[in-house]
Image (cartoon, rainbow, N blue to C red):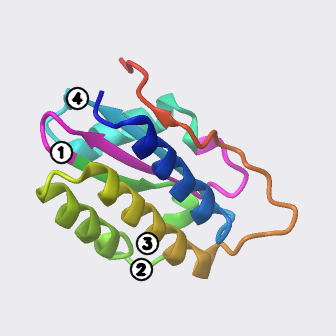
């Protein structure tokens, strides 16, 4: 397994903390290999498979990592894309790339998720009646 139990707990804690800043939903999906040439295309498949496009505000974000192939993507739903600037995810991807290049996938995800929560807060602030629409656990399901 890629992450120790402590690392998994830290990543899930980062998701929970980010979601305290925003009504957006954060999901992490990990695979060893990326079956697509382009990790963003694979992230789109995973996004649909996990039903991340079913949130009320269409404001879910997926952190996709294929660690064996050293590929990753960050994908936001259409509700996010409608309101954010075109380069919105660049700083988050840069953060991930910096950590991943050093082999620190756990630290990269934690910092990337923190960055995403901070960025999303501007456009999707946390609501008092917010419902956690997407499970905070790390997905490792085999996805066709």
Crowd band around label 2 with a 10 angstrom C-alpha radius: few (<14), some (14–19), many (20+)? few
Q: Quadrant of residue 109?
A: bottom left
Taking 21 as reference, is 101 left or right? left
Q: Residue 87's x, y, as percent?
A: 32, 76
Q: Image point 19% across, 55% down: which residue?
A: 100
Q: Earlier in the sequence, mark 1 or mark 3?
A: 1
Q: Looking at the picture, does residue 121 appear above or below residue 58?
A: below
**Who's the residue at 32% across and 58% down the image?**
107
| Disc ID at residue 115 | 3
Lateral position of residue 143 relative to residue 58, left or right: left
Q: Is residue 73 above or below residue 45?
A: below
Give the residue number, with chain letter if any, for mark 1. 71
Q: Secondary structure at mark 1?
A: strand
The residue carrying pointer 4 sits among few (fewer than 14), some (14 to 19) or many (20 or more) residues within 10 Å by Cα, namely: some
Magenta-highlighted residues: 53-71
Q: Which element carries disc 4, helix, strand or loop?
A: loop
Q: Work out whether mark 3 precedes mark 2 in sequence or the reverse, and give the earlier one.
A: 2
Q: Position of residue 124 (x, y in %)?
A: 65, 72
* Badge 4 vs badge 1, beta-carbon distance below 8 Å: no
- The answer for how far apart the CA atoms under marks 4 and 2 are is 31 Å
Instruction: Classify residue 106 as left or right of residue 121.
Output: left
| Viewer-side label of 2, 1 | 1
Residue 41 picture quarter: top left
Residue 69 coordinates in the image, percent (x, y): 12, 36
| Residue pointed to by mark 2 | 85
């Amino acid at each position: 397994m890629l992450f120790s139990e402590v690392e998994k707990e830290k990543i899930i804690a980062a998701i929970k903390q980010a979601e305290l800043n925003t009504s957006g939903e954060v999901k992490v999906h990990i695979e060893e290999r990326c079956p697509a040439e382009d990790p963003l295309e694979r992230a789109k498949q995973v996004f649909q498979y996990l039903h991340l496009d079913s949130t009320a505000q269409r404001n879910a974000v997926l952190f996709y990592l294929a660690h064996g192939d050293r590929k990753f993507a960050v994908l936001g739903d259409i509700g996010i894309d409608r309101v954010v600037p075109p380069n919105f995810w660049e700083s988050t991807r840069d953060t991930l790339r910096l950590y991943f290049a050093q082999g620190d996938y756990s630290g990269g995800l934690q910092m990337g998720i923190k960055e995403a929560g901070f960025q999303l807060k501007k456009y999707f602030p946390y609501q008092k009646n917010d419902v956690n629409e997407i499970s905070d656990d790390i997905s490792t399901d085999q996805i066709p």
